[in-house]
Image (cartoon, rainbow, N blue to C red):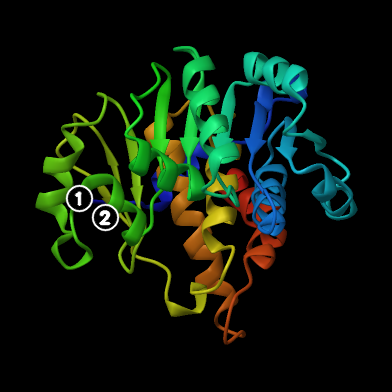
Amino acid sequence: MKVIDQTLLEKVIIERSRTSHKGDYGCLLLLGGTYPYGGAIIMATLAAVKSGAGLVSVGTDRENISALHSHLPEAMAFSLQDQQLLKEQLEKAEVVLLGPGLRDDAFGEELVKQVFAGLKQNQILIVDGGALTILARTRLSFPSCQLILTPHQKEWEKLSGITIEKQNEDTTASALTSFPQGTILVEKGPATRIWQAGQSDYYQLQVGGPYQATGGMGDTLAGMIAGFAGQFRQASLYERVAVATHLHSAIAQELAQENYVVLPTEISSYLPKIMKKISQKGT
């Protein structure tokens, strides 16, 4: 078991080059928020933008777009029903986050199939929320791109067949052998573990607590992972995912010193400040 320490944080979150531009910080596409789960994709988008993503586009229900823009005019948004735009955005995205607030219905299933079929090897796909449920139910074959899965315990049970009470290091390591080599798994729970298929070791969080048990927490984490995946290329993708996951809970732990419960949107608000501190320590 590996612990995420200050050295790793400083390796990943570095100061920005003075000559850089938005194209250097990731072209992201976030897909989800179908009725009645519109808030999920908004929280994921907030987290992605606040973590420093360069360009963020969102495919969601048309009725959800004005709500999204009232929170975050920085993101481009389009209707998931717009096949032409969806196709264009899928082609140009470096990182695709699929599933926050995605309903498990016929439309959701079609979307998951389309994304799985359309992505190429040099793209990164994060499968979260409703997309994990659809993946577990349909048993689709995995796309050829780099895969990141972010299940909570119930979703991991559906994906792996391991009941919650039997989920431990050994059963997860064994289940991961049936996933594509290099797949990154964020196994969320009271002691979240971050794995990479093909490696025997894993990272385990030493931060976080029950003050995070509130709706939207996972959507915010997925957005942060997407934001980190699109930048910080001096570190491996596995390290970027581990640091994003750690930071999500570390911020919550800090805010919980004065709050009984921590809201996911408060984590996103605090994110740029803590990233600035870490980047300055590493110089």
User: Residue 109: in sight, yes or no?
Assistant: yes
Looking at the image, residue 99 sits to the left or right of residue 174; the answer is right
Disc 2: which residue? 157
User: For the residue marked with disc 2, what is the amino acid?
Assistant: Glu
Q: Residues within 10 Å of mark 2 (few under 14, many from 20)?
A: some
Measuring 88% from the left and 44% from the top, which residue is drawn there? 73
SS assignment at label 1: loop
Measuring 63% from the left and 63% from the top, which residue is drawn there? 267
Q: Quadrant of residue 142?
A: top left
> 8 or 98: nearer the eye?
98
In contact (CB < 8 Å): disc 1 and disc 2 = yes
| Image coordinates for residue 129, horizontal then vertical, percent | 49, 50
Q: Quadrant of residue 23?
A: top right
Disc 1: which residue? 161
User: Residue 282: in sight, yes or no?
Assistant: no
User: For the residue marked with disc 1, what is the amino acid?
Assistant: Gly
For the C terminus, the image quarter is top right
Per the model, the C-alpha gap separating discs 1 and 2 is 5 Å
